[in-house]
Image: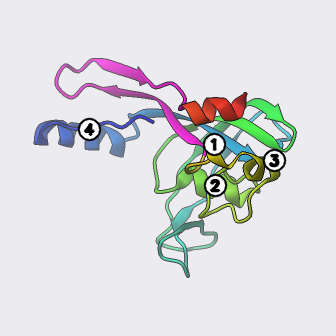
Amino acid sequence: GLLVVAKNDSAHKALSDELSYHGIEREYHALVRGGFKDDEGTVNLPIGRHPVDRKKMAVLLGDDAHAKEAVTHYEVLEAYGQISYLALKLEAGITHQIRVRMSSRGHALLGDEVYAGTKTLFEKHHPRLFKGQMLHAGELTFVHPRTGEKVTVKAPLPENFSEALE
């Protein structure tokens, strides 16, 4: 997937500022477990460090001061029975946001060994396709730190992801 990398300190500051006020637009694609009642929706649950496993993040309900709000919008691009292909857009970014949000709603990402638990039959029948979770940063839009122009970059799906869709 895509990354934005700063080549110098001033570019880093400009990109960090843009990220902090939610100016960078990101679209991800994911293959997740389960079907969806609605073809699109928004998930807005606070996320913070898992209370027991400090390497993981978790949805934290209540008055946890360490939880951060981060909105995730999803659209079902295709439904394959018990697997769905989604486009997801983030209003802000928190570590593991998509993975945590989807698994908390029963829609863990295929190939996600941290948040998914057991493998689906599809994963068991096609293990060579899963070299990690099926999550791809497919499109980024940001303001170029030097020119001030709006830049959109896109990356095609990785071969294993495309093959899984086929």
The one of 63 and 32 positioned closer to us in this rendering = 32
Q: Which amino acid, by three-letter code, is at mark 4?
A: Val
Q: Quadrant of residue 163?
A: top right
Q: Residue furthest bottom?
A: 52
Label 1 CA crowd tier, 10 Å (few <14, some 14–19, many 20+): some
Q: Secondary structure at mark 2?
A: helix
Q: CA gap, disc 3 to disc 2? A: 14 Å
Point out which mark residue 11 bears: none
Q: Secondary structure at mark 1?
A: helix
Q: Nearer the viewer's eye, disc 1 or disc 3?
A: 1
| Magenta residues, start to end | 134-158
Q: CA gap, disc 1 to disc 3? A: 19 Å
Q: Residue at x 17, y 36 (%)?
A: 11
Point out which mark residue 101 bears: 2
Residue 121 location (% of width, % of height)? 81, 52
Residue 30 location (% of width, % of height)? 63, 40
Q: Are marks 1 and 2 in contact (CB under 8 Å)?
A: no
Q: Are marks 4 and 1 in contact (CB under 8 Å)?
A: no
In reply to whether residue 166 is colored magenta, the answer given is no
Q: CA gap, disc 1 to disc 2? A: 23 Å
> How many numbered marks appear?
4
From the image, tell me which residue sits under label 3.
34
In reply to whether residue 143 is colored magenta, the answer given is yes
* Residue 75 in sight in this render: no
Q: Which amino acid, by three-letter code, is at mark 1?
A: Leu
Point out which mark residue 129 bears: 1
Q: CA gap, disc 3 to disc 4? A: 35 Å
From the image, tell me which residue sits under label 4.
5
Image quarter (top left, top right, bottom left or bottom right) of the N terminus: top left
